[in-house]
Image (cartoon, helix red, strand yellow):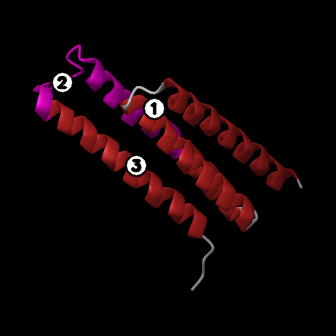
Amino acid sequence: MDNTYFWFAILILSNAVILYLLTANVSRLRLKLRILVGDGGNSDMVYAIRAHSNGVEQVPIFALVVLALTLLQASRALLAVLVIVFTAARLFHAYGMIFKSFLSRRIGAATTYMVQLIGIVAMAYQILV
């Protein structure tokens, strides 16, 4: 079996599960709070919506970076570290948003940005060298 896309697939699988759970959380709150559209001025709904939408903002571009690195035949160790740390960062961020833990949210966001930058620099290196 060719494992060329293994880490890309792990990234997509794990972050799809996270986004699915965040979507389900928004729907759960909509039913519970009877809010059909928007946030209804409810702070729990605001945090749930932003936790989901932040993931939707961050995951696709990072997935493209990992796919490009995969196609450029970056090292599997680099791909593994990027995918594992990014996914952990997304979990920290989601936890921080849903449970209103500023420290977890901050760690998740900062780590997400750091891993994205490392991925971008690695991609530039792969292209230029």
Q: From the viewer's perspective, is 97 left or right of 62?
A: left
Specify the farthest residue to the bottom. 1
- 41 lies above or below 51: above
> Which dot, 2 or 3, sits closer to the camera?
3
Which quarter of the picture shows residue 67? bottom right
Q: Calculate the distance from the C-alpha at mark 2 to the C-alpha at mark 1.
A: 24 Å
Report whether residue 73 is seen. no
Task: Quickly name the residue at label 1.
Answer: 96
Q: Residue 89, how many percent across, how many down?
A: 56, 42
Q: From the viewer's perspective, is 115 left or right of 39?
A: right
Quadrant in the picture for the C terminus: bottom right
Q: From the viewer's perspective, is 75 left or right of 54?
A: right
Q: Residue 24, how many percent across, how many down?
A: 25, 44
Instruction: Please state the extent of the stretch shown in magenta in the rendering.
Output: 31-60
Identify the residue at image location x=43%, y=37%. Answer: 95
Which kind of residue does numbered mark 2 sit on?
A: Val
Residue 41 covered by magenta stretch:
yes
Identify the residue at image location x=83%, y=50%. Answer: 125
Identify the residue at image location x=73%, y=64%. Answer: 77
- 21 lies above or below 8: above
